[in-house]
Image: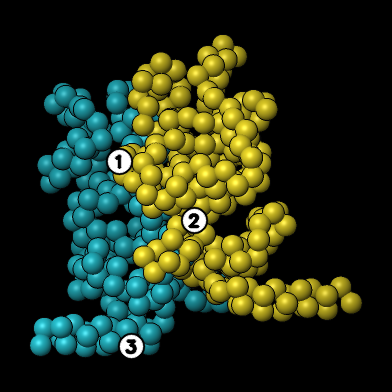
Chain colours: A cyan, B yellow
Amino acid sequence: MSAILIKYMKQYGDFSDDQMASILKGIEVQTYPKGTVLVEQGMISSTCYFVLSGCIRQFGVDEHGRETTYEFYTEEQSVVLFNQANMMKSSKYSLVCVEECVLVISGFTSDQEMYDAHEGLESMTRKMTEVMMGEVQEKNAVLISSSPEERYEILQDTRKDLFSRVPQHQLASYLGITAESFSRIKRRIDKSKLKMVD
Amino acid sequence: MSAILIKYMKQYGDFSDDQMASILKGIEVQTYPKGTVLVEQGMISSTCYFVLSGCIRQFGVDEHGRETTYEFYTEEQSVVLFNQANMMKSSKYSLVCVEECVLVISGFTSDQEMYDAHEGLESMTRKMTEVMMGEVQEKNAVLISSSPEERYEILQDTRKDLFSRVPQHQLASYLGITAESFSRIKRRIDKSKLKMVD
């Protein structure tokens, strides 16, 4: 399992085998059954996760009882709720395992000691965060500028696996649309694809 | 002017006066008249900015000619288009000065040399990026979960100054709504505020 992690870390830093072994020694890997609540809304947590396998859903419930799905994290994605990890604020979100998950657990973001102990680790984290930031900026741009139909198609193009891993009403919420709109768009797109095949 | 920058940097790193002076020596400050195009969509640029005063609009035009405003950057905000700064990709966005702007200009993100030369600078950048990431995650959450009316009210609460600094149709675009919806919401909210005053 740690092969995935090593491959991932090597993208962002030039670590020797010794350095890598020493970093990995400080890292914990855990398996969680489907349905596990990793963080519950309102809880204080500065734990960060890296998904080796499985799927985590990030969601929140507002004061009117409306639930919104904000993100799905799958293989090779980092799960860091930055605002709360930095500030030890109570979480606005819950994190729940949608499938059985094998996760790397760390307190990276708030841990200057770990950075001081391992040369190159802070640099790696900076680069990882910048890449994540780029992705979130792009996602934001899509949310602002596109229609629900376009968002559906972009999700199909970029994260097709989610369509078979996650319940439809959660995907709808993630796209910021109702379950009814989701079904309508799905029918329309499936139909037009069938026509293209004809 | 550099007092603003020093105050900002000190939030994220414990720099001595000597260290600060040495970092500032490598930094360029420029004044740009209103209307200046800092980055044009399609251009390759890895320049980053920090706003000492003024307002920068980030926008893009899609293949159908539709223009969308993605962000407004004002005092004490960093302007980093992470994806392109990291990857030297051509920009999906334009950056234009909505007002006369006094900006710090740097190539921070891609500049490992600068980090190696100044102790604490990479750590500062990591922390700054994490705080920015927290803000973008929050903005994302708002975009997914709220109605246009709620987004209007959140913008009024959090960035009231934009309402007098920026044309209404650009604000509408930034909220992901049409100019007509924007006017309608504005009338409704102004009216209900008047009623509360009565």
Amino acid tagged 2: Phe
Picture coordinates of residue A31, whole percent (x, y): 20, 54
Query: Are the residues under badges 2 and 3 in a single subunit?
Result: no
Q: Nearer the viewer, residue B67 or A56?
A: B67
- Graded by Cα atoms within 10 Å as few (under 14), some (14 to 19) or many (20 or more), the crowding at tag 1 reads few
Q: Is label 2 or label 3 in front?
A: 2
Quadrant hosting residue B60: bottom left
Would residue A14 be seen by someone viewing this image from the given angle? Answer: yes
Picture coordinates of residue A48, whole percent (x, y): 35, 47
SS under mark 3: helix
Would residue A86 be seen by someone viewing this image from the given angle? Answer: no
Q: Which residue is mark 1?
A: B87
Picture coordinates of residue A45, whole percent (x, y): 44, 49
Quadrant hosting residue B24: top right
Compute the Cα span from label 2 to label 1: 20 Å
Q: Is label 2 or label 1 in front?
A: 2
Amino acid tagged 3: Arg
Q: Nearer the viewer, residue B143 or A78?
A: B143
The circle on residue A184 is: 3
Amino acid tagged 1: Met
Q: Which residue is mark 2?
A: B59
Quadrant hosting residue B122: top left
Q: Residue furthest top?
A: B18
SS under mark 2: strand
Residues tagged 2 and 1 counted as in contact (Cβ below 8 A): no
Left or right: residue A31 compared with residue B40? left
